[in-house]
Image (cartoon, rainbow, N blue to C red):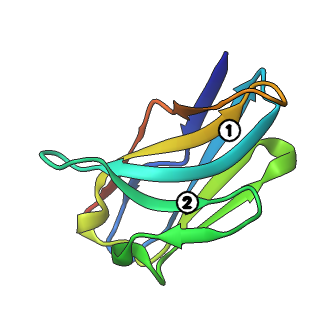
Amino acid sequence: QVQLVESGGGLVQPGGSLRLSCLASGNIFRINTMGWYRQAPGKQRELVAAISGGGSTNYADSVKGRFTVSRDNAKNTVYLQMNSLKPEDTAVYYCNAGVQLRRWSNEYAYWGQGIQVTVSS
């Protein structure tokens, strides 16, 4: 069983910063791509940022230059540094990870429970 637990969300004023963390735990052989998605009320879940096992990153156009995704493989943790936050960044943010449970097993996608980020004055 694999669990992803997010932390670091909350309320912040426009222009402020937050840092989200997501810790993966359980019977893990390897974690491949890790990423962050978000879902605002009435909207579909969208990719915010992702980072491969080798460190390659990709970002949604709306967050480029403001958000930075990183990971600590030794800690099975992915981070999302969010700067210059805007009201439109308000959403529930979800952590996602592609996990192999054994060396030769398929990769399975796991999700965190989600964490609220609210940008408001």
Residue 23, numbered label: 1
User: What quarter of the picture does the C terminus occupy?
Assistant: bottom left
- Residue in the image at 80% along x and 29% along y: 104
In-image side of 112 versus 2 (left or right): left
Q: Position of residue 51 (x, y in %)?
A: 63, 61
Q: Position of residue 118 (x, y in %)?
A: 31, 54
The residue carrying mark 2 is 50
Q: Is residue 99 left or right of residue 81?
A: right
Instruction: Answer above or below: position of 64 versus 114.
Output: below
Q: Would you call the spot at circle 1 few (<14 residues within 10 Å), some (14-19), or many (20 or more)?
A: some
Where disc 2 sits, the SS reads: strand
Look at the image and tell me whether residue 121 can be seen. Answer: no
Measured as percent of width and height from the top left, residue 94 is found at 44, 43
Q: Where in the figure is residue 58, as x and y percent of width and height?
A: 53, 70
Q: Nearer the viewer, residue 41 or 34?
A: 34
Quarter where residue 105 is shown: top right
Quarter location, residue 16: bottom left
Q: Quadrant of the N terminus?
A: top right
Give the residue displayed 72% in from the left and 57% down from the top. Answer: 71
Residue sitting at x 66%, y 51%: 78
Q: Which label sits on residue 1?
A: none
Q: Which amino acid is tagged 1?
A: Leu
Give the residue at the far top of this rendering.
Answer: 1
Whether residue 107 is situated above or below residue 44 in the rendered picture = above
Mark 2 is on which residue type? Ala
